[in-house]
Amino acid sequence: MNLLGTILVYASLAAMLLGCVSVVRPLSFIGIASRQYGIVVFLCGVAVFLIGVNLPAPEKRIAARTALLDDFLPEYQFAEFHSIRIRAPRERVFAAIRDVTANEITLFHTLTWIRRFGRPGAETILNPPPNEPILGVALRSGFMKLAEEPDLEIVLGTLVVAPPGWRPNKEKKLTPEDFKALQAPGFALAAINFRVEDAGHGETLLTTETRIYAVDASTKRKFAVYWRTIYPGSALIRVMWLRAIRRRAESGNL
């Protein structure tokens, strides 16, 4: 449903754009012969957009614990998973996960610039220094380390939605146990892991998974609009991130 929602959202945005252009100048070469047809195409786009963002996001639950990530978000409604094989030992790949920088990730700055609508701002994972480890930037700008098993897996977490007016307690930082126990309406929790496993023949399998759990139905509906809009860019960043880790690990540039 989540992927279908994303497809419908982007198809609707294309239809709305074509409809708007055709209201000014009909695009007869694609079958929009008049301004009236342009209005119809635009309105159809609006209808498909509303369908796409309002598709249900069913809750999923892991069948059995297989990773540290499962300890923190065993239930979720939104997720993405990516993997890559790397010709390097597991220890070197894990070191590359920790050390890779934004500059090494192809299109990272371009995609995050689009994500923040070109606005400058404070240092965050969406606006990182170019030559600092990206995980370090994340950990000092909104993410927390939930768990780590050296040379196997690291898990980071953050709050992606909070109730209006909510502010974190500056005197008491959120702990991993607090993260697991947070079930109040209005919150959506996100966790991302990087995990390495021996793949044989001197290779390592590197995976990353992102999960989001919205505590209540209203928050889930609101987050669905955001997720289905940003998903293609998010997925591309993850793919390029894994490739950057592979380049660093295989080059021995640690």
Image (cartoon, rainbow, N blue to C red):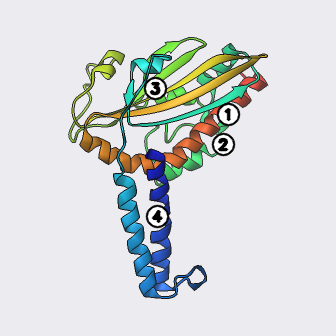
Task: Work out whether mark 2 precedes mark 4 in sequence or the reverse, and give the earlier one.
Answer: 4
Q: Residue furthest top?
A: 150
User: As shown in the figure, which amino acid type bears the numbered disc 3?
Assistant: Leu
Residue located 58% across and 14% down the image: 152
User: As shown in the figure, which amino acid type bears the numbered disc 1?
Assistant: Ala
Please determine whether, in this image, residue 186 is positioned above or below residue 231. above
Residue located 50% across and 74% down the image: 18
Task: Work out whether mark 3 precedes mark 1 in sequence or the reverse, and give the earlier one.
Answer: 3
Task: Work out whether mark 4 precedes mark 3 in sequence or the reverse, and give the earlier one.
Answer: 4
Please name whichever residue, 166 or 231, is drawn nearer the observer in this view of the structure.
231
Q: In the drawing, does residue 227 fall left or right of residue 248?
A: left
Q: Which residue is mark 3?
A: 139
For marks 4 and 1, give the CA distance. 31 Å
Please name whichever residue, 173 or 31, is drawn nearer the observer in this view of the structure.
31
The secondary structure type at the circle numbered 1 is helix
Dividing the picture into quarters, in which one does residue 46 lie? bottom left
Q: In the drawing, does residue 75 fall left or right of residue 3?
A: left
User: As shown in the figure, which amino acid type bears the numbered disc 4?
Assistant: Leu
Residue located 63% across and 28% down the image: 100
The secondary structure type at the circle numbered 2 is loop
Contact (CB < 8 A) between labels 3 and 1? Answer: no
Contact (CB < 8 A) between labels 1 and 2? Answer: yes
Q: Which residue is mark 4?
A: 13
Task: Work out whether mark 1 precedes mark 2 in sequence or the reverse, and give the earlier one.
Answer: 2
Q: Which mark is residue 106?
A: 2
Q: Which residue is mark 1?
A: 244
